[in-house]
Amino acid sequence: MNQLTEPSFSKAEFGDNFVWGVATAAFQIEGAARTDGRAPSIWDTFCEKEGAIADGSDVLIACDHYNRLEEDLNHIAGLGVNAYRFSVSWSRVQPRGDGPWNEKGFDFYDRLISGLEQRGIQAHLTLFHWDLPQALDDRGGWLNDEAMDCFVVYAQEICRRFGHRLASICTFNEPWVISILGYEQGVFAPGIKDRSVAMQVAHNILVTHGRAMRAIREVTPDLSAGIVLNMSPIYPASDDPADVEKAKIDDGLIVRWYMDAIYHGRYPADVITYLGADGPMIKETDMTDISEPVDFVGVNYYTRNFSSTGNPWDVTSTGNQVTDMGWEVYPDGLCELLCRLNDDYNVGKLMVTENGAAFKDVLEDGQINDIERQSYIQSHISATLEARHRGVPVEGYFVWSLLDNFEWASGYEKRFGIIHVDYESLERTPKASSLWLTEYLSGES
């Protein structure tokens, strides 16, 4: 098996209290989509849409995590991490998004959290990782005040049942993806293509986040609570003033729209001007709700981006490695982003809540020598450490993902896991990247 040069940085440099974890999302791994009272989400419906999923797949089985929970918990423990980030399927615990709770659904998450407790692993819970109950979407979804109110009740109930057993909770995972890919570009559920709708959804989700933050603190005042945002440094593709201006606006849409609203209680003026009539309707108390203080911001980072008004930027032009998603491998961008967030917003605490890469893994003689993924993880851990050396309060790093899984519109064609999943037999096989991580966290690497 090929070997990488061992990293020059050790786990000890991060300190004893640093959070090391792996991350997943309910819809992508649980399966059991029609089991024990779970109802459809918008993603179940989207999977039924002709051509929506690259390989025409669904999540009726997925990784069957629902039935293989103990096995997967043992894999997590075997890695040597001290934390696990997972999401709750809202329609599993409350099928309609309002009304009766589903105790069988709650029983699953109780067993999950108990299993983590038994293994000495922190539970980091995400309330919403894109799978809105279809019944709520049928009544207007995120454009309807009802869904916003229901989410607050859902957040309270999760905290009432589990809050005292969690290390952290986040309200939403990647609201940019929810709104832009789901409601403007239409490539994610629910498949709408309307910029004005997308921006209203982006705003309503942030309002809901702020209201949920208050609700969480009413039930569990000592629980660390925040939001998880996907962010990237944005560069102009050339010195052309049009590209420079577009890069500024694109940065405003993916970074400043969320961070300015949460930390400054306002949206970027240049982005509001750019949106024009497509800007959201903002009620009098909305920005106060949105700027409810957070305990942390989770940062999901995969690559950097370039903006161009002409031909799309050629991802191969820098000569850097490109992943199976077509994303450039650029670890320096993670350090740059973390430092920028600290400088511009004086954040109290940052967590790298997702970081990983898809590559075309090959299973040979029962082994997956994913040296490219191993290199990716090493280099981004190093970038995280560099940010800490520069004074950035980044206190955790989570690898995406524990398992190969349903990669949304890509179906099962893209593999991010550090543990391989055979989708026929559902057998789990640790990859070289997971074996390296185990060695690193044990202090042996």
Image (spheres, helix red, strand yellow):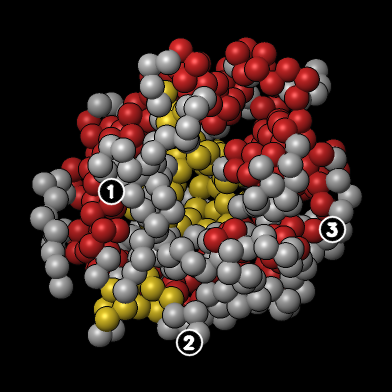
Residue 29 at x, y percent in the picture: 55, 68
> For the residue carrying disc 2, how many other residues have a C-alpha within 10 Å: few (<14), some (14-19), or many (20+)?
few
Residue carrying label 3: 135
Instruction: Give whichever of 317, 152 is nearer the camera.
Output: 317
Tell me the residue at 89%/50% (across/down): 139
Give the distance between the C-alpha atoms of the residues marked 3 and 1, in whole angstroms.
Answer: 43 Å
Residue carrying label 1: 321
Tell me the residue at 43%/83% (across/down): 427
Residue 355's label in the rendered image is none
67 shown above or below 136: below
Residue 67 at x, y percent in the picture: 57, 81
Can residue 211 be seen here? The reply is no
- Residue 170 lies left or right of residue 151; in this view the side is left
> For the residue carrying disc 1, how many other residues have a C-alpha within 10 Å: few (<14), some (14-19), or many (20+)?
some
Q: Which of marks 3 and 1 is in front?
A: 1
Q: Which of marks 3 and 2 is in front?
A: 2
Q: Which amino acid does label 3 sit on?
A: Ala
- Residue 376 lies left or right of residue 112; in this view the side is left
Tell me the residue at 29%/58% (across/down): 373
- Examine the image and state in which quarter residue 359 appears: bottom left
Q: Quadrant of the N terminus?
A: bottom left
Give the distance between the C-alpha atoms of the residues marked 1 and 2, in whole angstroms.
Answer: 32 Å
| Count of marks placed on residues | 3
In primary-sequence order, the first of circles 3 and 1 is 3
Residue carrying label 2: 425
432 shown above or below 168: below
Mark 2 element type: loop
In primary-sequence order, the first of circles 3 and 2 is 3
